[in-house]
Image (tube, helix red, strand yellow):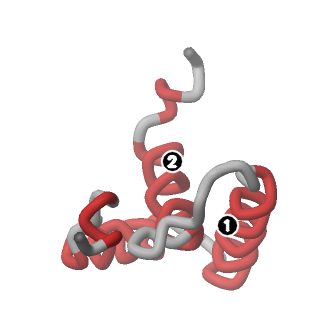
Amino acid sequence: MNKYNEYTKIDLKYITYKTEELLDLAKNRYKITIQIANRAKRCKYEDIDIIDDPVNKPIIKAIIEMVDEITQPEILSD
């Protein structure tokens, strides 16, 4: 059995779309790049009990989370 079957892979087109959406929303590309890198690093080291997902890396998760937070601010209010 292939261990990659255990993980859910995010579609590459979806990742590209979300990245472009984030870049369109960002006023400063450098700042958003630093924020994504810091979030991904924090995620990687905070979740040390979780086995690294070889398919969906922390950087991809950080991009998707940031876009969702910007486009759907109601998810933060819960």
Callout count: 2
**Residue 59 in the figure: left or right of residue 40:** left
Q: Quadrant of residue 78 in the image?
A: top right
> For this rendering, which residue is in front, 67 or 37?
37
Q: Secondary structure at mark 2?
A: helix
Question: Local crowd at mark 1 within 10 Å, few (<14), some, or many (≥20)?
Answer: some
Q: Residue at x 71, y 63 (%)?
A: 44
Percent x, y of residue 34: 74, 77
Q: Quadrant of residue 58 in the image?
A: bottom right
Percent x, y of residue 18: 34, 66
Q: Secondary structure at mark 1?
A: helix
> For this rendering, which residue is in front, 5 or 13?
5
Question: Local crowd at mark 2 within 10 Å, few (<14), some, or many (≥20)?
Answer: some
Q: Which mark is residue 48?
A: none
Q: Quadrant of the N terminus?
A: bottom left
Percent x, y of residue 26: 55, 69
Q: Residue at x 21, y 70 (%)?
A: 11
Q: Which residue is mark 1?
A: 40
Percent x, y of residue 24: 42, 72
- Which of discs 2 and 1 lies nearer the camera? The answer is 1
Q: Earlier in the sequence, mark 2 or mark 1?
A: 1
Can you name the residue that lies furthest to the bottom here? 30
Q: Is residue 34 above or below residue 65?
A: below
Instruction: Give the residue type that dot 1 points to.
Output: Ala
Q: CA distance from mark 2 to mark 1?
A: 17 Å
- Tell me if label 2 and label 1 are in contact, CB under 8 Å: no
Q: Is residue 25 above or below residue 49?
A: below
**Residue 52 in the figure: left or right of residue 55:** right
Instruction: Give the residue type that dot 2 points to.
Output: Ile
Q: Which residue is mark 2?
A: 70
Q: Residue at x 45, y 67 (%)?
A: 22
